[in-house]
Amino acid sequence: MTGHVAAIDASPSCGLYSAEAERACLGAALLENGLLHGPLAELAIDDFFLAANRELFALMLEADEDRQPFDHSTVAESLRERGLLESVGGYGCLSDLIDCIVTDEGLVSRHVGSVIPAPPSREAPGQHRPQDLGARSGSRPPIADAGDSGGSFAGGLRP
């Protein structure tokens, strides 16, 4: 399953990274969109280590913000229209995300805890992570524009 991994362009701030936890969170959201308002609401786009996973989570948040239901097929179509499908590993990667995923809120919460990076043990004076400044108080970061590809999310999501 890890053969579909896209490029990594970030480094975990705490030195720990759980590909399985990231996949579990994304898969749970694909199967049960409502989890974005439950345990997955604690996550920010930048909590994901892999660029592909950040892209997928941003797209899911965008669909949710527009009150559009989504699943692996609609996410794949939206990515294809934007020219980003292969950058996240293609259709196979999205299908793999929902294999063996459990949407139990307690389990999803545990996965969320593994995805959110632990704060560094030492910070330079004046340096704080966004969540330390209240960014996790229910607000979500703005989603970066994926470019003007003219595509839309199946069901009306705008690029």
Image (cartoon, helix red, strand yellow):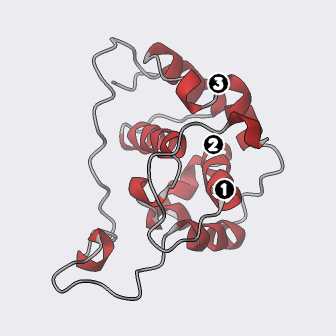
Q: Nearer the viewer, mark 1 or mark 2?
A: 1
Tell which circle, 1 or 2, labels the residue nearer the N-terminal end.
1
The Cα atoms of the two marked residues, 1 and 2, are separated by 17 Å
Q: Which residue is mark 3?
A: 90
**Where the N terminus falls, by quadrant?**
top right
Residue 105, visible in the rendered structure:
yes
Q: Amino acid at mark 1?
A: Ala
Q: Which residue is mark 1?
A: 19
- The residue nearer to you, when weighing 49 against 154, is 49
Residue 154, visible in the rendered structure:
no
**Where the C terminus falls, by quadrant?**
top left
SS at badge 3: helix
SS at badge 2: helix
- Counting from the top left corner in percent of width and height, residue 24 is at 69, 55
Q: Amino acid at mark 2?
A: Leu
Residue drawn where x is 48% and y is 41% of the image: 60
